[in-house]
Image (spheres, grey):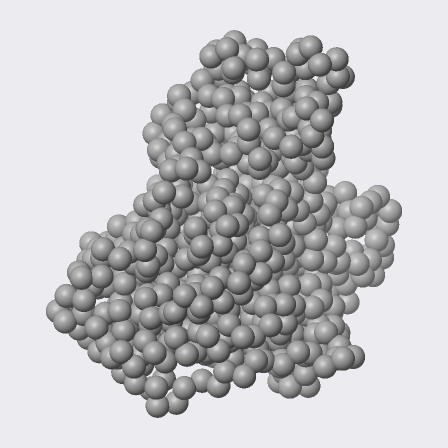
């Protein structure tokens, strides 16, 4: 007790050293920084939360305190001697409101001031998930091999399963091993980039990615052979695995497959090498084991120095968000054999408990889009299998994983043609999610995710040795998707998914709207307040371009540009490309059976000073009409350009009659206001993709002629099935404080108003104090449904209405 008091006194600068207290840098997080967490006023759904603070330039060690009061009279937790700028306690904390602060000690034993206190709350029902302390964590790793995916004591049970209920999976492994033995991979070291080769060029890309696939073929083959031999497969499998492993050990660890030279080759080298090493360890000689340790000390050290401590404060690097757990696999395989491996493992688990996942929100959203959601979370499931077996940590207990499957469900419902916003998502299909969603459904026991999987052909645990280890996935009760709301907001990642039928895209009209606080960084680069439209299994209004090579002229010049999506440029300028500063935010969302509403604000996404306001309101009158109201303001007069994109040429007869037809569906677009737009269409990309990419898409611009400081627009989009002719009659009126639109629908009409000024809104018979309102009229002109966003009063021709059904 006395020691704790003396340390605390020293940290607060009241010891008798005579040194002046050092200032603690409490400056808020900037772009790309994780920030102080738990954030001021936040509520934690996990107990304890991970604590994170700005790394202090002179710090050698840190002290963290948590208290029930702002004055820290009632301290409930203290951690001393922390050498990282993150910490997750090894015990749970009291529920309710708490305060936290941190201080540091510098090299010369100088002590800092405390950081300012920050308060947060822990929910009564928060998931209890403390992090083991370092000593406890390390002692959980088996002393003997294998250590990854399986412990030595589990081998007898797995061998029984291989001859029993998992014999089909085992036989498939044996067949794969026999194929490898018949046609083993070459093991010559992959080539370096020739001197003078331009990074990102097609020849460079061929070597860059080719070395990755070459490395995987060698070392994944070795791991497969080694694991199958552990189950009782031929000894020859093990000897070939040993041969492949030792051949790869001769490659220059800082050469063509080095992590810093080519991380796409270096990362798989490291984790497949570690797996093979632990699976085949009993066949290696002492000299061979020492050679493997020498190689991985270099390779693992290179990863660690790149990631730690930088990733703990600046975690928004795409590749680093898989590299950390690949390093964790290396650490477990070589713990107590490479001296630094203990530090590697401690770092990896501190990432997991304190700084993961980074691209997500509590609703299960994923900023980088469907392709990177699937790619990175599939790899994370490997780490979860590893840490569960080696460390006894069930990562699926993190609250994020209770919602993770909703992202696929709403972004890519069954039979959807594409994967929505995000890099490489254009080639993603819902069927490709089955393996990952099978794992998530089984782990979370989620009956709706199970229904998603069943609608796409049934569950799959995946093949190979990982599929065998996971075994036959336990049955999960299935409940139909139609019990869920058809639409969902992923607020933290700024993504709204509006649907009429999430059970099958072929019956669905699907609007995806983005206005993200993550900005346009990394692989989630599309502009804010953009939208996509799919209808009846067809893509109608789309994101455009195709990645020919990451960072190519086309990729960064077109796909990172506002011009590539259905959004707005101002005076020919788009939003800041590929930037965490190009932020948007969802400012309104409501969903119901007959109407969905979403609004986004994206002024700050444009270069500083260009735009004061860009609020986009979207009303989806299901399934027949999408009404978009844009409210734009600039400090100086500007022209404005609205962009629309389609996979087929649009039939354009002026701004009020634009038609899109794709396969079994189409839509009619009426740019109702402002009048006098200059409309043009092209199939050219600027800049175009490389010649090997054969892609034709169509881009429409509608541009105002006269510059203005304010511009308010209304666009009506009517999706329909092929062969149908939707009613297109619509009128727009401007009142003192609103814009009002009356639009025909099959069997009736809808009247909508949007706020443009102060006071109550009154237009076309609809009166309200809300900012946005709508009334659905039946064929006789009587109100059938009503909607008012953030309002208390709503009436139609003097008749008071209630939101929802009115008759």
Residue 261 versus residue 590 in the image, above or below: below
Please state which of residues 457 and 70 is positioned toward the viewer in this rendering.
Answer: 70
Residue 505 versus residue 485 in the image, above or below: below
Residue 645 percent location from the top left of the image: 63, 69
Instruction: Choose top left, top right, bottom left or bottom right for residue 91.
Output: top left
Q: Quadrant of the C terminus?
A: top left
Residue 468 percent location from the top left of the image: 26, 67
Residue 759 percent location from the top left of the image: 65, 30
Please state which of residues 266 and 527 is positioned toward the viewer in this rendering.
Answer: 266
Residue at point 63% right, 16% down? 10
Residue at point 63% right, 54% down? 306
> For this view, does 297 lie left or right of residue 708?
left
Please state which of residues 442 and 761 is positioned toward the viewer in this rendering.
Answer: 442
Residue at point 69% right, 57% down? 578
Residue at point 78% right, 79% down? 196
Residue 367 versus residue 721 in the image, above or below: above
Q: Residue furthest left?
A: 164
> For this view, does 610 lie left or right of residue 685?
right
């Amino acid at each position: 007790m006395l020691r704790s008091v003396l340390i605390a006194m020293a940290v607060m600068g009241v010891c008798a050293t005579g040194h002046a207290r050092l200032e603690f840098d409490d400056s808020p997080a900037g772009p790309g920084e994780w920030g102080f967490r738990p954030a001021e006023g936040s509520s934690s759904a996990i107990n304890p939360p991970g604590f994170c603070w700005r790394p202090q330039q002179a710090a050698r060690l840190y002290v963290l305190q948590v208290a029930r009061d702002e004055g820290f009279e009632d301290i409930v937790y203290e951690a001393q001697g922390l050498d990282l700028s993150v910490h997750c306690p090894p015990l749970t904390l009291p529920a309710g409101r708490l305060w936290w602060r941190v201080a540091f000690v510098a090299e010369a034993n100088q002590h800092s001031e405390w950081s300012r206190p920050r308060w947060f709350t822990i929910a009564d029902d928060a998931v209890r998930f403390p992090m083991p302390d370092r000593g406890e964590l390390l002692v959980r790793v088996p002393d003997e091999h294998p250590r990854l995916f399986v412990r030595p004591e589990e081998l007898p049970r797995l061998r029984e399963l291989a001859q029993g209920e998992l014999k089909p999976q085992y036989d498939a492994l044996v067949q794969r091993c026999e194929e490898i033995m018949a046609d083993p991979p070459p093991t010559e070291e992959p080539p370096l980039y020739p001197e003078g080769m331009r990074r990102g060029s097609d020849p460079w890309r061929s070597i860059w990615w080719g070395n990755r696939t070459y490395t995987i073929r060698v070392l994944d083959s070795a791991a497969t052979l080694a694991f199958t031999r552990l189950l009782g497969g031929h000894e020859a499998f093990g000897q070939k695995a040993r041969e492949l492993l030792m051949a790869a050990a001769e490659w220059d660890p800082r050469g063509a497959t080095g992590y810093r030279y080519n991380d796409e080759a270096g990362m798989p080298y490291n984790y497949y090498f570690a797996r093979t090493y632990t699976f085949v360890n009993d066949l290696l000689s002492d000299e061979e084991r020492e050679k493997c340790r020498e190689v991985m000390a270099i390779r693992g050290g290179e990863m660690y120095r790149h990631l730690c401590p930088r990733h703990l404060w600046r975690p928004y690097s795409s590749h680093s968000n898989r590299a950390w757990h690949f390093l964790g696999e290396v650490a477990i395989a070589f713990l107590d054999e490479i001296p630094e491996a203990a530090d590697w493992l401690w770092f990896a688990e501190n990432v997991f408990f304190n700084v993961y996942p980074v691209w997500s929100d509590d609703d299960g959203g994923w900023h980088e889009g469907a392709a990177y959601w699937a790619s990175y979370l599939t790899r994370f499931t490997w780490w979860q299998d590893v840490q569960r077996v080696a460390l006894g940590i069930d990562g699926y207990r993190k609250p994020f994983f209770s919602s993770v499957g909703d992202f696929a469900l709403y972004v890519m419902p069954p039979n959807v043609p594409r994967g929505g916003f995000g890099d490489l998502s254009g080639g993603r299909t819902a069927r490709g999610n089955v393996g990952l969603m099978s794992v998530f459904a089984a782990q979370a026991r989620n009956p709706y995710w199970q229904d998603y999987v069943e609608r796409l052909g049934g569950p799959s645990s995946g093949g190979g040795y990982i599929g065998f280890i996971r075994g036959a996935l336990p049955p999960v009760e299935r409940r139909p998707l139609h019990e869920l709301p058809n639409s969902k907001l992923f607020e933290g990642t700024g993504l709204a998914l509006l649907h009429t039928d999430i059970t099958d895209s072929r019956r669905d009209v699907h609007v995806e709207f983005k206005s993200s606080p993550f900005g346009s960084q990394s692989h989630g680069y599309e502009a804010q307040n953009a939208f996509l439209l799919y209808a009846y299994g067809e893509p109608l209004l789309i994101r455009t371009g195709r990645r020919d090579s990451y960072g190519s002229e086309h990729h960064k010049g077109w796909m990172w540009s506002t011009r590539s999506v259905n959004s707005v440029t101002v005076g020919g300028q788009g939003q800041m490309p590929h930037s965490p500063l190009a932020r948007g935010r969802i400012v309104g969302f409501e969903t119901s059976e007959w109407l969905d509403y979403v609004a986004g604000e994206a002024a700050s996404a444009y270069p500083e000073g260009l735009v004061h306001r860009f609020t986009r309101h979207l009303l989806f009158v299901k399934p027949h009409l999408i009404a978009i109201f844009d409210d734009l303001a600039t400090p100086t007069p500007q022209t404005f350009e609205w962009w629309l994109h389609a996979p087929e040429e649009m039939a354009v007869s002026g701004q009020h009659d634009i038609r899109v037809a794709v396969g079994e569906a189409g839509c009619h677009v009426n740019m109702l206001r402002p009048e006098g737009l200059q409309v043009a269409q092209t199939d050219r990309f600027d800049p175009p993709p490389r010649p090997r990419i054969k892609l034709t898409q169509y881009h429409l611009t509608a541009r105002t002629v006269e510059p203005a400081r304010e511009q308010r627009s209304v666009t009506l989009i009517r999706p329909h099935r092929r062969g149908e002719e939707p009613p297109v009659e619509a009128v727009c009126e401007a009142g003192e404080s609103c814009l009002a639109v009356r639009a025909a629908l099959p069997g009736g009409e809808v009247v909508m108003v949007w706020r443009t000024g102060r006071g109550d809104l009154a237009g076309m018979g609809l009166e309200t104090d809300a900012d946005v309102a709508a009334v659905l009229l039946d064929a006789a002109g009587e109100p059938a449904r009503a909607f008012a966003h953030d309002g208390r009063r709503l009436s139609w021709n003097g008749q008071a209405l209630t939101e929802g059904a009115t008759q």
